Image (cartoon, rainbow, N blue to C red):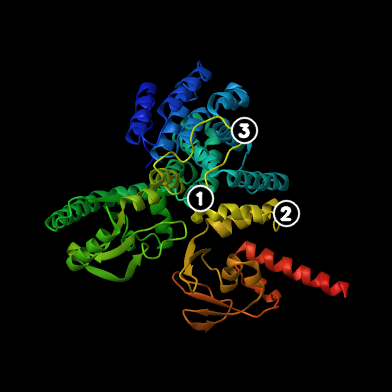
Amino acid sequence: MAKEVQTNTETLKQTLFDLISQCQKQYQRSVIETALTFAEAAHKGQMRKTNEPYINHPLRTAITIAELKMDTQTITASLLHDTIEDCDIPPKIIEEKFGNEVCELVKGVTNLGKIKYRVPRENTEKKQITENAENIRNMFLAIAQDVRVAIIKLADRLDNVLTIEGIRHEKQYRYAAETLEVHAPLAHRLGIHTIAAGLEDATFPYVYPKEYQWVKTLFETNAQKLTIYIQKVVEKLKSILKEENMSDVTVEYRIKHLYSLWQKLERVDRDITRIHDIAAMRIVTQSIEECYQILGIIHSLWKPVPERFRDYIALPKPNGYQAIHTDVFCDDNRIVEIQIKTQEMHEQAEHGIAAHWFYSSIRTRKPTQHYKKRTAIKTPELPKELTWINQLQEWQHYFHNPEEFVESLKIDYFKDRVFVLTPKGKVIDLPRGATAVDFAYHIHTTLGNECSGVKINGKNCPLNQELQSMNIVEILTQKGKKPSLQWLEFVKTAIAKEKIKHELKQNIRKLEKR
């Protein structure tokens, strides 16, 4: 459920600087204090539609960024993110006071704010649909320049949906629906699940009011008994781990948020008894070795559920997620999901790409980017888990139509995923329903074009066979081979379809020149 919004300005300031104090070595506090003073002066006298001082909004946005443990520049830019658009502060002033990097971040967020998206309805005109698509394409291409712009924008959006009562009633549905369709999936794809869950739960009652009320009632009916049960299990495991001299371990539980619960209920015919992770246990350790030690203790205590064990430490998900998941038959033979991970893995799971900056700064023992005035900026290098953002640039060669770009974005990056393996053990992230040909084109265009067959788990299989998670996929090739027109009938990803079409057109042109 949506969290309560703090509206006391002094309390918000204290919260922000308490967070900064927790990681004092990482932050340049004086820079952030200067940015807050500057933002307060710029927004002086401005009020939000929720009848509170406007400065509360950038403060809450900055708090979200600080909770993600982002760098000084990102926190500074989040405090200043509305000063250009709403206060007419020239970018040059921001650059002079805070440096080029912060200025570029603020300008990036400002430009994203100008990109408007409207949820299409049945009577939406073709012109509006095309404009929507072009706006989304521009948004994602802007994100590809510096992903921190997207993170600030998501934090900004989170505060806006948490205070959605300040928006006119007739606009609330549209704003909430836009959030569910564009911003929440983006937060998930960036791995920032704390923001994604906040966006979903805040907008759920406005977009699907009947479904929200039904899930809320169903949850409340079961929540008390479930919470009492899982608390007993947690205390039992804590006691056992203490006996095993594992005291520096956190054992807790988390309750599935309502929107996520509704989505899962829709997949199991609304039968809540078929969902075993409404309340899941989470064990956070200090080392990978302890993760496996605790797994052994758990399996000696409770019988594991066959085929419900996943070792994402040995085989991380493509977005970098690592943990051990195991379902066990707990007390009273009830199935409980348990997740085991290190503290760093937990931070990565909660904060996704945002955690990259924090752990980079710890490893180098200095801030990822020093605060200073620059004539040019070097944005932090993306980790390999987010190379898909850079692939958006490549798409410009294949998708000239903005509507096709958006549809491919929804299919290739925002749908349910399967995780398959190359023969060398590299994990490849594909949309559910993807085939070997999709896999081949994901790896490299030439591999796709010359694909002549596939081995899945060592066995020859048809090219149109849908891949399942943890399949080992080996593409067989024939030098000089060209793609088949029939492949277009079964490939799933939009990028594979466009690459096939592109190659087929090239072949036709070559034949015509003979």
Q: Nearer the viewer, residue 159 or 244?
A: 244
> Label 1 vs label 3: CA separation?
35 Å
Identify the residue under disc 2. 400
Which mark is in front, 1 or 3? 3
> Label 2 vs label 1: CA separation?
23 Å
Q: Which amino acid does label 1 sit on?
A: Pro
Q: In which quarter of the image is the N terminus?
A: top left
Which mark is in front, 2 or 1? 2
Q: Position of residue 246 (x, y in %)?
A: 18, 55
**Above or below 276: residue 352:** above
Sooner in the amino-acid sequence: mark 2 or mark 1? 1
Which mark is in front, 3 or 2? 3
Q: Is mark 2 on a helix, strand or loop?
A: loop
Q: Is mark 1 on a helix, strand or loop?
A: helix
Instruction: Tell whether 446 sits left or right of 388.
Output: right
Q: Residue furthest top?
A: 45
Q: What residue type is labelled 2?
A: His
Residue at the image point whose x is 22% and y is 51% from the top: 249
Identify the residue under disc 3. 375
> Label 3 vs label 2: CA separation?
33 Å
Identify the residue under disc 1. 185
Instruction: Tell whether 117 sits left or right of 302.
Output: right
Instruction: Tell whether 276 sits left or right of 422.
Output: left
Instruction: Tell whether 285 sits left or right of 409.
Output: left
Q: Is mark 3 on a helix, strand or loop?
A: loop
Q: Which amino acid does label 3 sit on?
A: Thr
